[in-house]
Image: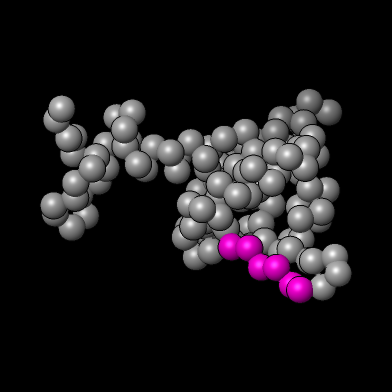
Amino acid sequence: MTVGAQFTRTEPGERYDVFHTDCPARDMVDHVTSRWGVWVLISLRSNDLRFFELRESIQGISEKMLAQTLRTLVQDGLVWRKVEPTTPPQVTYGLTEFGQEVGEPLTELFDRITGRLSQRGAGQR
């Protein structure tokens, strides 16, 4: 079995082959661009939020899916999680520096789409 370039990085700045199914970066791209991953990153772009605040900010997401998405994004190093030892425990989430970097183009995309929709809506009146 041959090991592809996606597993070895011999030169600084060399990129992984995200189109290869075994690429470790591909999993992270899948997590970020998943149905709920995008919305979590956009929701956390300006404020740290507690679990239920985050759930309320993303309409349509179940507690189970939010918990799974957050767990994955925390493991990927995009989101941090802070548990305060109160009764009940208060859990707060926010973007890491890496999460902010990854979320920036998503925010730009979101702003472009909503800006375009706003223009279309204004033009139809």
Left/right placement of residue 26 relative to residue 85 reads left
Q: Residue, x 23% and y 42% (percent of image)?
A: 7
Left/right placement of residue 1 relative to residue 40 reads left
Q: Is residue 13 above or below residue 87?
A: above
| Residue 111: x %, y % from top left | 63, 45
- Find out whether residue 41 is within the magenta segment: no
| Residue 105: x %, y % from top left | 50, 48
Considering the image in quadrants, where does the C terminus appear?
top right
Q: Residue, x 25% and y 46% (percent of image)?
A: 15
Considering the image in quadrants, where does the N terminus appear?
top left
Q: Residue, x 66% and y 57% (percent of image)?
A: 44
Residue 119 can be seen in this image? no
What secondary structure predominates along the stretch shown in magenta?
strand
Residue range corresponding to the magenta coloring: 80-85
Residue 85 can be seen in this image? yes
From the viewer's side, name the closer residue of 65 and 33.
65
